[in-house]
Amino acid sequence: MRCPFCAHDDSQVKDSRPTEDSTSIRRRRQCESCGARFTTFERVQLREVFVVKNGPDDGTGRREPFDRSKLEQSIALAVRKRGLEQERLDQLVSGIQRQVETAGESEIPSSRIGEMVMEGLRQLDSVAYIRFASVYRDFSEARDFEEFASSVRDVAQADDNGR
């Protein structure tokens, strides 16, 4: 593993342990050149999956490898300042990644990943759900927010009445 401080190619693992949700291994490393310590995380990748982005006009989109960090960033933006526990967010991201990798397909449309994120956020936090939807569904006017928020409120009330 390359040292993030001096770019030396060799480091020594000092400690390994599973993360709290057991989806990855946390490793403490020490650079053999400069002695700096740093942490890495190792995750299982079941298969190489490509995300097919929405094409501008012709319906064909570009393909790029699935990137967990992009998923984490988009969810982090939606939940910003919402006070949600990082562990719950990690579980959401790991769950979506697991669904993507176990779907049995080598390609997945970005729209399907977006729907998975929306479903996860809907269950986690209604404000984050609306934030993500505003970007994902490309809201252009305040009316779009109002209509979507009222549909979220109606569903939440129906869920509360059904309990």
Image: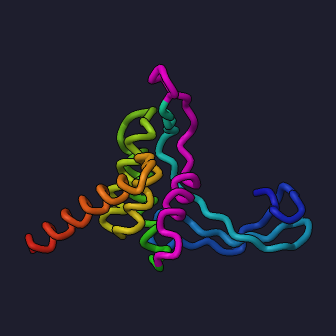
Residue at point 39%, 58% (across, down)? 95
Indicate the position of residue 132 as horizontal and vertical percent values: 44, 57
- Magenta stretch: includes residue 95: no
In the image, 36 versus 12, the foreground residue is: 36
The magenta stretch spans which residues?
Answer: 55-82
* Image quarter (top left, top right, bottom left or bottom right) of the C terminus: bottom left
Residue 38 picture quarter: bottom right
Residue at point 31%, 56% (across, down)? 148
Indicate the position of residue 111 as horizontal and vertical percent values: 40, 40
Q: Is residue 163 above or below residue 118?
A: below
Determine the residue located farthest toward the left in the rendered image: 162
* Image quarter (top left, top right, bottom left or bottom right) of the N terminus: bottom right
In the image, 71 versus 8, the foreground residue is: 71
Residue 112 picture quarter: top left
Q: Is residue 56 above or below residue 39?
A: above
Determine the residue located farthest toward the top in the rendered image: 58
Indicate the position of residue 105 as horizontal and vertical percent values: 39, 34
- Magenta stretch: includes residue 63: yes
